[in-house]
């Protein structure tokens, strides 16, 4: 039975400027469309039709699908089709539970190693995040945000840093969801980042780790609340308790 042709008229056609690594470029482009919700959860993607729409061959499209599947963004079927995955409470719990544990550890390791120049760099990153939000430049915000987290966890090394980077990418959809649903939270986010930076500069490892756990858990709890999920005592809860010594958050963001 022939595969029904899906329409991708709503999908912008990119210009791939490099002839090498086309699969990597296609993956990055489709990933951004999914994270930005241009390609929404539940939508079906056909390799052949999408490749024709984007002006690439099926081989890089197949490789891009493989990478998206590894990131948990799509489920690939046997007939060259895939479905964009919806948000998952179990995935959220596992991803953020692991992020809290590893980034709290990494920021504790880095506490006392962020000198005055590091603080100045961190402040420039916070300024960049604020300016990017004001300009509506999501890509710039992500770049500054990643750089900030790398700064305050810089004493960790592979494989910890590699796993943290992968987790940050996989949780980007959830971060974007919260930004869309709660645009007024960014002032609170900046305050939390600055508190983490100060604790790292002052060498207070316990405080830096607890602040990082608070910071990461806020995003997860907002997604849980907004989507009406129940909140079991899973990985997020136990990682939070382990990092902070507390059984519940000190406070919540102001909505």
Image: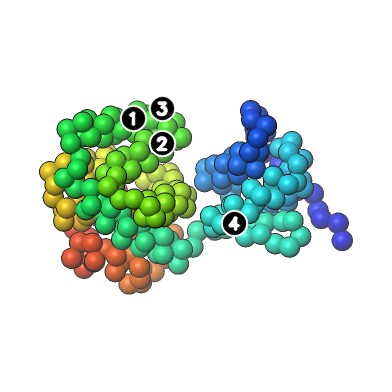
2 and 1 marks in contact (CB < 8 Å): yes
Which class describes the residues within 10 Å of circle 4: few (<14), some (14-19), or many (20+)? some
Dot placed on the residue nearer the N-terminal end, 4 or 2: 4
Dot placed on the residue nearer the N-terminal end, 2 or 1: 1
Which class describes the residues within 10 Å of circle 2: few (<14), some (14-19), or many (20+)? some
The percent coordinates of residue 172 (x first, y second) are 45, 48
Mark 4 = which residue? 69
Query: Which mark lies nearer to you, 3 or 4?
Result: 4
Q: Give the CA distance from mark 1 to mark 3.
A: 10 Å
Instruction: Tell me where residue 176 sits by quadrant.
Output: top left
Q: Residue at x 20, y 40 (%)?
A: 114
> In the drawing, what numbered circle is on residue 143?
2
Dot placed on the residue nearer the N-terminal end, 3 or 2: 3
Q: Residue at x 32, y 58 (%)?
A: 102
Q: Residue at x 42, y 32 (%)?
A: 140
Mark 4: secondary structure: helix
Instruction: Tell me where residue 244 sits by quadrant.
Output: bottom left
4 and 2 marks in contact (CB < 8 Å): no
Mark 2: secondary structure: helix
Mark 1 = which residue? 128
């Amino acid at each position: 039975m022939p595969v029904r042709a899906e329409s991708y008229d709503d999908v912008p056609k990119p210009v791939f400027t490099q002839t090498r690594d086309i699969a990597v470029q296609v993956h990055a482009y489709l990933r951004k469309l999914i994270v930005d919700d241009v390609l929404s959860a539940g939508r079906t993607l056909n390799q052949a039709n999408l490749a024709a729409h984007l002006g690439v061959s099926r081989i890089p499209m197949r490789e891009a699908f493989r990478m998206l599947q590894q990131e948990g963004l799509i489920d690939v079927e046997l007939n060259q089709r895939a479905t964009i995955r919806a948000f998952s409470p179990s995935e959220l719990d596992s991803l953020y539970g692991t992020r809290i544990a590893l980034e709290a550890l990494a920021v504790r390791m880095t506490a006392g190693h962020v000198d005055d120049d590091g603080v100045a760099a961190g402040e420039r990153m916070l300024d960049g995040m604020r300016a990017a939000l004001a300009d509506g430049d999501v890509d710039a915000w992500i770049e500054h945000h990643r750089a900030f987290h790398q700064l305050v966890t810089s004493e960790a090394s592979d494989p910890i840093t590699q796993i943290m980077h992968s987790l940050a990418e996989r949780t980007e959809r959830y971060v974007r969801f919260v930004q869309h649903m709660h645009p007024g939270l960014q002032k609170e986010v900046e305050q939390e980042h600055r508190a983490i930076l100060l604790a790292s500069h002052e060498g207070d490892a316990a405080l830096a780790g607890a602040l990082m756990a608070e910071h990461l858990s806020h995003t997860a709890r907002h997604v849980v609340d907004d989507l009406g999920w129940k909140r079991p005592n899973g990985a997020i809860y136990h990682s939070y308790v382990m990092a902070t010594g507390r059984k519940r958050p000190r406070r919540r963001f102001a909505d």
